[in-house]
Image: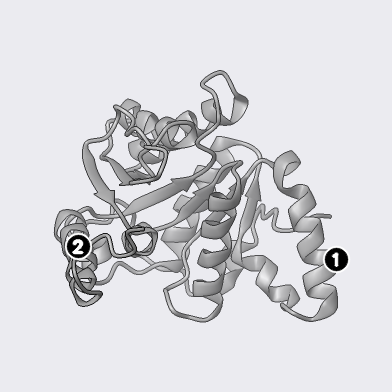
Amino acid sequence: MKTDEFGPGETWRVFRIMSEFVEGFETLKDLGPAITIFGSARTTRDAASYKATLKVAKMLAQRGFAIISGGGPGIMEAANRGARMGKGVSVGLNIKLPVEQKPNGYQDVSLTFRHFFARKVMFVKYASGYVIMPGGFGTLDEFFESLTLIQTAKIRRFPVVLMGRKYWEGLIRWIEQTLVEEGTISAADLNLFYLADHPEDAVEYIVRFHREMIRPTGERRKRSPLPSTVSKEGESGMNAGGKRGMP
């Protein structure tokens, strides 16, 4: 049984991993502000969540954001397709899987990774926000990782939007009634994400967050399409119309 896919020793694997990071950094370094959209690869084109993703991605692209997805079918395809519809930059970060994932045909920039962890770095490093559509284990992984990175101050805070109250309300109720009640997270941690039902609400929240909370800095936001003024009210801008958690 072959245990080392890269060559005679584990040392060579480091160079293969390094090459994925280098290619990703070099390809995406001038991307500008972008929103990463996650969701199920199994979603069909006639599903409500597919159509909602199209609209969210299109509207965000029209507001000046590039759109990043995992490059595959389902919600990922809808994200890239919507970016094209909005005349924005459409980025696909594809992954090699045992059952081959076929890249969708709506990508302007396309990268293919062998390692999930290198791909995950690109998702978050070049994101100015996340939109979490209905999805499975992979979607949940990205959602909770983003909250962990923000909670532990490993990345700057950016908007994390859960789309679809009906789909996510059971998870949110469990977070409130179990994690908060048991003290494994604080009630304030519920403010790290925002629950939206409508594409317009999600897009407005993201745009408002950037106007009030995020100051363009470094390589990630060289050409922000948003006003550079930052509210001095701090967190207060986050509360208008907020739907975090369940009533």
Label 2 packing within 10 angstroms: few (<14), some (14-19), many (20+): some
Q: Is residue 238 above or below residue 75?
A: below
Which sits in the foreground, 179 or 224?
A: 179
**Type of amino acid under label 2:** Phe
Residue 13 image position (x, y, % from top left): 23, 69
Whether residue 65 is visible here, answered yes or no, is: no
Whether residue 38 is visible here, answered yes or no, is: yes
Residue 46 image position (x, y, % from top left): 56, 18
Q: Which residue is mark 2?
A: 25
Q: Which residue is mark 1?
A: 177
Q: Is residue 93 left or right of residue 210?
A: left
Label 1 packing within 10 angstroms: few (<14), some (14-19), many (20+): few
Which sits in the foreground, 156 or 11?
A: 11
Please report the residue visible at 35 percent of the width from the left and 43 percent of the height from the top.
67
Residue 125 image position (x, y, % from top left): 33, 64
**Type of amino acid under label 1:** Gln
Please report the residue visible at 81 percent of the width from the left and 57 percent of the height from the top.
173
Q: Is residue 229 left or right of residue 161?
A: left
Q: CA distance from mark 1 to mark 2?
A: 40 Å
* Screen quadrant of the N terminus: bottom left
Please report the residue visible at 51 percent of the width from the left and 73 percent of the height from the top.
150
Mark 1 vs 2, N-terminal side: 2
